[in-house]
Structure formats: C-alpha cells, structure tokens
Amino acid sequence: MKIARTSILSLLLVSCLSACAPPRSASPLGGTLDVIGPDRAFSTALNNNEIPADWVLSGDTSESALRITTLDRIPALNVSAERQSFALVRRVHASLLATPYLSWAWHVVPPKSGPHPVRIIVGLVNRDEESKRPWWQIGGRNEDVVDRIITIIWNDTALGRGNIKKLKTVKDRPEAAEYIARGGPEQGGRWWVDTVDLALIHRQIWQSDDPAKIDVKFIGIAAKPSAQSASMGIATLRLQR
C-alpha cells in the first residue's frame, strides 16, 4: 500500500489519521513488542516508499524526512524535521500496566535553539469509556480514538531531565503530557539508550484515571514544523513489561 498523506491539525502534531484500509494492531508477545527495530520488513517498505504493515503516516513529507540509515554502524530510522508537521505511528493493542516500560536508542542532531522538533509519541485510551474527543483516529475507526497523549522529547538543555508537565490543549482534544527524557547539544551526535515508565508518567499527570483500564493504542514518531535543520535516529524502540 502506497503511503497515504493527509493534513494535520493539532497542538503539536496532527489530527485524524486515515488509510484506505485500517491497519492491524500489533500486540506484545511474551510481554515485549518491538515497535521499531528497524527490521527488514519495515526498512524495505520505507525504501520502497510504502507504509510498513500496521503503521500509519499522517502529513506531507519529502523523501528525506523518513529514511533508513546507519549511524555509527547501527541501523536506524532517521527522522528529519521539515516545515510541515507529520507523524508515523504504529497501531498497538497493549495494557499499560502489563507493559509499562518504553525503551529506545536515539542519535540526535539538535536544532540550533529550542527543544528538538522530533519526538516520540504514545496514545492511550480508557477501554471502558466512550471517548467524546475524536482527535486522532487511526484507520478512521471510532474505536481507535485516544484519550491521552504522552510526548517524549529531547530538550534544548540537559537540565530538566525527568520532568513531566501537562500541556495546554484546545477544546475537544485529548489531554497531553510532555516528558523530558534527555537534552542539550553537548549530548548530541552519539547514541544514547533510555527507558521510561509510561504507567508512572500517566499516574503523575492523570491521578483520577484507573490505570488498570488504560490501553496503549499507538506508539510512534512525530515532528513539529521547523525551519531549523534537526534530525533524530531512532532504533530498538520497544514496549515491554
């Protein structure tokens, strides 16, 4: 299936994701889901200008925005920010409490100023409640609407690592939180491996939620519009217990 491009309307990312046919959801096997390896199938699809299976792309991107490359002998998905927002997410079906840990390796070329425009995003939903905010539909199906968004960013300085804040969102959009995982130009240009506890982030921001009812619905990469040159290599992005 060729990459389907749609417009993005969002606080930092996007609006609805639609595809010709709804992609399937990926579920953890043995308590682990490898979201991005990148494995051969994922790499082959992108190199052929196709959407990888169970992934959805939203936004207008050039050929250089998403590409498979090797950074310091490690294969990676290299994401370059552009003047338009875009997002590439994988539909996931996983319990937040059963698989709360998200780990990844990243190799960052920071912008000259400000937080990195490329970030990791995670969509959450309460499986027992009907969402009234169809902000992000993957495959155009109502059951794929998310209630919460967690964004994981590379900050403009090394200070603030581990800080979490609730983001301001407009009406009829899911609530969102931002987590600073790392930052600073001095840490750019080399590989780092990081792990976050998504359940802990969720609990600190949304204390009234019942975490036992929260599911992970998508995991992926998004980029804010940027006039600055900035890229990020992502490898071994994994959800696990």
Image: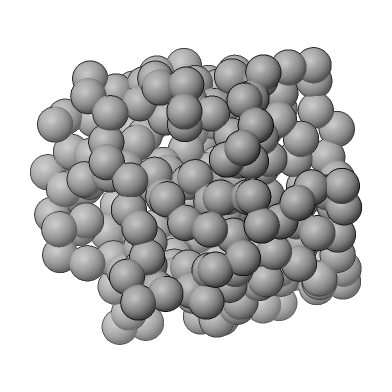
Q: Could you tell me which residue is drawn at 58 percent across and 72 percent down?
A: 101
Q: Could you tell me which residue is drawn at 53 percent across and 51 percent down?
A: 216
Relative height, residue 208 to residue 145 (above, below): below
Question: 234 or 172, which lies in front?
Answer: 172
Is residue 216 something that shows in the picture?
Answer: yes
Question: 15 or 223, which lies in front?
Answer: 15
Question: 136 or 83, which lies in front?
Answer: 136
Relative height, residue 50 to residue 179 (above, below): above
Give coordinates of residue 140: x percent, y percent. 39, 20
Whether residue 217 sits left or right of residue 43 in the image: it is: right
> What is the number of callouts on the image?
0
Relative height, residue 138 to residue 229 (above, below): above
Whether residue 207 sits left or right of residue 126 in the image: it is: right
Give coordinates of residue 206: x percent, y percent. 83, 49
Q: Could you tell me which residue is drawn at 62 percent across and 25 percent down?
A: 130
Q: Could you tell me which residue is drawn at 47 percent across and 38 percent down?
A: 87
Is residue 121 something that shows in the picture?
Answer: no
Give coordinates of residue 40: x percent, y percent. 15, 65
Question: 123 or 192, which lies in front?
Answer: 123
Whether residue 20 sits left or right of residue 239 in the image: it is: left
Q: Which color scheme did the rendering employ for the protein?
A: one colour
Give coordinates of residue 221: x percent, y percent. 49, 49
Screen quadrant of the N terminus: top left
